[in-house]
Image (cartoon, grey):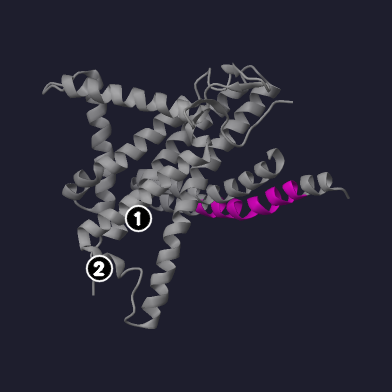
Amino acid sequence: MDAETINLLSIALIMIFGVIGPSFAIGSIGSSALKGISRNPEAASKIQTSMVLAIAFAEALGIYALVVSLILKFV
Amino acid sequence: MLEISLKAEELFEIGSYTITNSLFLSFIVLLILSSFALMFRKKTKIIPGILQNIAELFIELLLSLMDSVLTSRKKSEKYLPLIATIFIFILVSNWLGLLPGVGSFVMHKEHGNIPLLRSPASDINFTLTLAIIAILSTNLFGISELGFSKHMKKFFNFSNPIKFFVGILEFVSEFSRMISFSFRLFGNIFAGEVLLTIVFFLVPYIAPIPFLFLEIFFGAIQALIFSMLTLVFLSIHIAKEEH
């Protein structure tokens, strides 16, 4: 394999393994927020704000992987 | 193929100071915000007009959000300028970066065209500066609230080995906060730019609309997260240690 191929492969691998963790995290955040809302519908707005915040934190980890792969692709 | 540049391109130089395209847009944001501020300084009335009503509503919302973290209205009014400045500046710069014309107005240079405007947060220097300002000011507020020696005791504590190691971890985490702050904002906004560029390149009509909505939403969420995290770190630093 030449360097170009390895570069492209590593970009794909970074995205595969970098997205696994955040996807599990976002799934569990969403499911527990739904449980909380269905048990206590009055608290829906409060739960939603903190859910969106927590999802954004989890998503930031996937974004780090995206940044690394973008650097590999475009620099 | 379309061209995507990770770092902001240079437009021109003033002396030895280079003006990049993202710096240019952040100057425009600065101009808009300061002209708003000057306009309101003269025209504040007891019976508010439409714009003033909106601004008051917005400030009230922000204050009630801060109350939920700082637990007292007096403290939230004291620290409102820092948090609100960070929030409004990031929000306006993210949203201005989505307007048509950003990226499509180009400037002719000897080696190809470069876009005249670029979303400020898609330049790492902008986000890193904001992160350093946020972390430094939370530490300074901590010093002013608790006193210098008490604040430094959080980081350098020689009373027992456990506290010593916790202090070192705290000290390192201050720097890792800066990095995570800056890369979170940069990554989100830059990824959004790349996404929009690719979608506009593939399907120019109708298809980009949901992505534009997504980016409007993310711009607001990222501004909220940046300011909320600053607020949380601030509340940690100004909290008196309980025994």
The quarter of the picture where residue B64 lies is top left
Tell me what residue is drawn at x 48 percent, y 46 percent: B182
Bin the neighbour count of mark 1 within 10 Å (Cα to Cα): few under 14, some 14-19, many 20 and up: some
Query: Given the image, on which type of amino acid does mark 2 rest?
Result: Ser
**Chain of the residue under the numbered disc 2 shown in the image:** B
Q: How many marks?
A: 2
Bin the neighbour count of mark 2 within 10 Å (Cα to Cα): few under 14, some 14-19, many 20 and up: few
The quarter of the picture where residue B47 lies is top left
Q: In the picture shown, does residue B239 fall above or below A57?
A: below
- The answer to whether one can see residue A48 in this image is no
Q: Is residue B145 magenta?
A: no
Q: Could you say which is closer to the camera, residue A6 or residue A18? A: A6
Report helix, strand or loop for mark 1: helix
Q: Which mark is residue B233?
A: 1
Tell me what residue is drawn at x 64 percent, y 22 percent: B200
Report helix, strand or loop for mark 2: helix
Tell me what residue is drawn at x 42 percent, y 70 percent: B168
Q: Is residue B43 left or right of residue B99?
A: left
Mark 2 vs mark 1, foreground winner is 2
Which mark is first along the chain, 1 or 2?
2
Measured from the top left, where is residue B80 in percent x and y?
Answer: 25, 42
Q: Main SS type for the magenta part?
A: helix
Query: Given the image, on which type of amino acid does mark 1 rest?
Result: Phe
Q: Which residue is mark 2?
A: B149
Q: Where does the magenta region start and end?
A: A10-29
Measured from the top left, where is residue B128 in percent x and y?
Answer: 46, 45
